Amino acid sequence: MKKIYCLILLIFTSIYTYSQIEISDSDLNKLIEIGEYYSKNVMLTEKSAFEDLEKFRTEKLNNIIDVLQTRSKQSIEILDEKYLNRPNYDDLVMWYVIREVHYNLTDKENEPRISIEVAKEFVNKKIDERWLLDNYYFRLYGAVARIFNKTDLSKYNIELDNYGLKSNTEKAIVYLNLMDALGTRFKVLQMVKNNKKLIEFASRMPKFNGKEYFYYSDFQYEDFEWIGHRKKEMFNERHIGLLYEIILAHMNAESEINGRKETVEIYQNSIMTKPEYFKYSSLKSELKKLYKKSK
């Protein structure tokens, strides 16, 4: 009887060791292997990546492997509802473990810890769910950016109400992460003064909630502290600030190539006319001047 009790206790412990999520030791070890593999192959562009990732598949890790394999294929499928849907809580935590294993191994300032220590810390640690969500959609960045470089996405509509997101904050997190991946190209083209190419890329942008990307302005939520790669910032200052830069780059290009009409359309239908958000931008003084002129 004592042996049976010990066996049951051992099985129970091996499955429910961690407080935040239910994960077995074998699945945790596979998760660590994924994190270590990801750290060496962040872009997942190696030809063997798809097959390599399959070796880490378990029932618990199915969703994570599916996303990583789709990323490795550089497939437009990454914009399918399956991948834009809000992951369940366990998956979000596991994605965060992958992040922390990766950051630990690439930390140039500190001696890396053993990966199992990092993994156990973060499956036990209560993490702000906004951070978890942001981390997941950030992991799509590279794939979305590469696809946009070569694909016309103008027929795509990213309907934020369809992804199981729980609040306007979560919808903004998804929108701003996708805009980071898509719109950063505008800033690059602005720097090299290729406005014609910038307009071409703008015409290839997907819709958000059935409208041009710049119409989205639902940021009426409390700003929150956010951590990127070790550095803490305020989420809106980082992301809405970048959105202003993207819109300004687009407006400047339209002004030069197509004239006033298109520029005014962007201005009047975007956060350019929302002074309550100017505080999030390093360009707030310029934004205020433009706003006064428009009155």
Image (cartoon, rainbow, N blue to C red):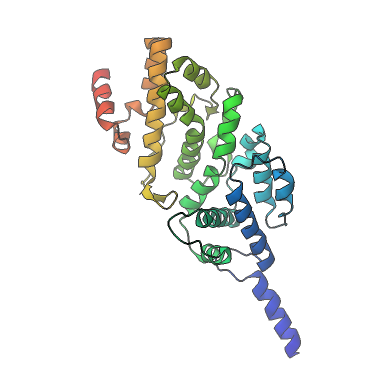
- Quick check: 130 above or below 290? below
Query: Residue 279 at x, y = what percent?
Result: 29, 37
**Which of the pair 23/192 is nearer the observer?**
192
Q: Residue at x 41, y 35 (%)?
A: 218
Query: Residue 244 at x, y = what percent?
Result: 37, 30
Q: Residue at x 36, y 35 (%)?
A: 241
- Relative to 163, 192 lies left or right: left
| Residue 188 location, quadrant | top left
- Quick check: 184 above or below 137? above
Q: Residue at x 55, y 44 (%)?
A: 139
- Relative to 75, 285 lies left or right: left
Query: Residue 215 at x, y = what percent?
Result: 44, 26
- Quick check: 94 above or below 163? below
Figure quadrant of the N terminus: bottom right
Figure quadrant of the C terminus: top left
- Quick check: 20 above or below 170? below
Query: Residue 44 at x, y = what percent?
Result: 63, 42
| Residue 220 location, quadrant | top left
